[in-house]
Image (cartoon, helix red, strand yellow):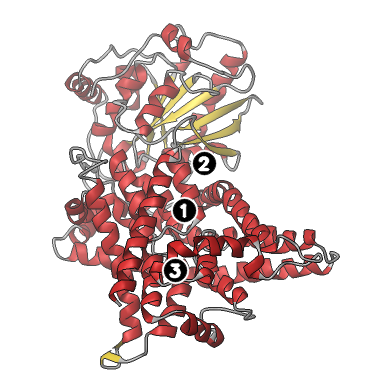
Amino acid sequence: MSPVATSPRADRSRRTDVPDSGPPVVALIGPPNSGKTTLFNRLTGLRQKVANYPGVTVEKHVGRARFASGLELDIVDLPGVSGFSARSPDERITRDVLEGRIEGLRAPAAIVLIVDAVRLETQLMLVGPVLERAIPTLLVLNMADELEAGGGGLDDGGLAAAFNVEVARTDARTGRGVDAVADFLDRVAVRAAERSPAGPEAAGPLGRAGLPLLAALTRRRAAVQRALATAKYRSAGPPRLTQRLDAIFLHRIAGPALFVVLAALVFQAIFTWATPIMDGVELGIASSGQWVAARLPASWFRDLLIDGVWAGVGSVLVFLPQILILFLFLGILEDSGYMARAAVIADRMMMRVGLQGRAFLPLLSAYACAVPAILSARTVDDERDRLATMFVTPFMTCSARLPVYALLIAAFIPERPLLGPFVGTRAATMLGLYALGLAAAVGTAFLLRRTVLRGKPAGFVMELPPYRIPSLRTLGLRLLDRSKIFLRRVGKIILAVTIVLWVLAQFPRIDGSPPPIEESALGQMGQVIEPAIEPLGFDWRIGVGLVASLAAREVIVGTLGTIYGIEDTDETSLELRAALQRDLDFGGAVALLVFFVFALQCMSTVAMMKRETAGWKWPLTQFFYMLALAYVGALAANQLL
């Protein structure tokens, strides 16, 4: 892994659109699981902004901090990396930030490099590439208390002398030692305000990069070993708790069994715990909509505001509890150190279909909702594996499909016992639909990794951190961050789709009132596509429902209720079941179930795929691939039954 180093002059020649004003920038760098983000949250609190770097989907976290001098700095929390080989988007972004290549972002005036003091032999490998940039650097030894508790030791002065860099000890979880980091940053802000050079000439108390250019990994490792010898470093023994837990969690039999139990717990929590909160959100949106509607005169504007905008906002907000519960569990599992073990256990199973072990939890969480599952696929390091994971995620049966399944199964599948009183025909049908979606996901992943995403199997190397108690502050800030990202990225698009569907159902107006549904623009669209869906056993009414369900799958239940003139419609409506039994035969009903198993009828998922892949290529390919599979599957089901 050769370092990438360019001269400051070459860096400046490649920078574009660098802001002329604003606080200086400090880059916060560290390997994964080093406590970097915890330190970032300590320094910036809630004064953070989240966006994507230009042209890529790697998130840019920037926080502003004010220091004792009254001056401010913008701190950039870079992705956790172990080197600058540019094999991943995270490594490329980190390298480009240090070299001043990022559009709209100044080159850093200083670097804070944070490493886990318990794992210095591996994490100090990042020191060489960082110091080669000749930018004032502070080396932060995080969680040094654990080093001492494990019988280890280190001479900070010796390490500072070996690397010719300032060294500070911290415990980012408790805040101990963070004042030393703030003091360094304050001096950076003062130096920048005095317009002192921040390049290779900058020496003195801020420190200067003194490590020679290392051309190979072996030379860098040798330099780290010499520095540790100078610092009289003694490694800490593995914590007894970590040894005891690993004996269970990584056991050949007990490990996978506990993994399945924990995965089931996450699934159950996402699927059930969020329900009361989601019901409360829906009730709040409906009640507030009624309150607003009662205070506005009857008009098309009120209908648009309440039925379009208000309902659209509610359709986005209703997913938020699932997202928060998902990322709460992911945060606990990751910060505690178990996520690394789970990835190792799952890797053996996932390798058979061409995916990494890290892909398991995103696929598991997709049973609640594909949107947060696609977000959580960022934990997959390899870009091909990550794309394959996001591509197959919508095949997993999300909760939005359940109202459709419940309606059609209750209407067309008679309840008969299969396994005594434990499993009946309806439950077996529901489980079969889940299994069908899983089979489609596995088959598609297998196909992708051997065709368009073909490549050598990614090396899966995972350093296992010690078990730790997660920080409540860090978990809370992460949930707040995820909430902002979800609402900002998905809300606008699904809101626009909802409004468009409302408009199509309201026009053309007849004597100032909405037209009958079959004469509306939405109804006419259903009649236009009826010839295409007739071979599947569907009529124009189902066609309208399919079009409306593009906003969200469960919308088809209310849409069909509107078409049939049935009020207060849900999946338990006996009148709607009778209407469907009259207009659909058994083959058409099974075809509709199969169609919903395969089709990507969720614009919020399409929107998230577009955001995560930085373009329309993959979401459109995904949408039409799943649509084609749904059409062929529904056609086969209708013809065979």
Q: CA distance from mark 2 to mark 3?
A: 38 Å
* Quarter of the rendering containing residue 169: top left
For the residue pair 63 and 112, the one nearer the viewer reads as 63
As drawn, the label of residue 605 is: 1
- Residue 542: % across, % down: 50, 70
For the residue pair 495 and 78, the one nearer the viewer reads as 495
* Quarter of the rendering containing residue 230: top left
Which of pointers 2 and 1 lies earlier in the amino acid sequence?
Answer: 2
Which three-letter amino acid code belongs to the residue tagged 3? Arg
Q: Quadrant of the C terminus?
A: bottom left
Determine the secondary structure under disc 3. helix
* Quarter of the rendering containing residue 393: bottom left
As drawn, the label of residue 83 is: none
Q: Residue furthest front?
A: 531
As drawn, the label of residue 401 is: 3
For mark 2, what is the residue? 41
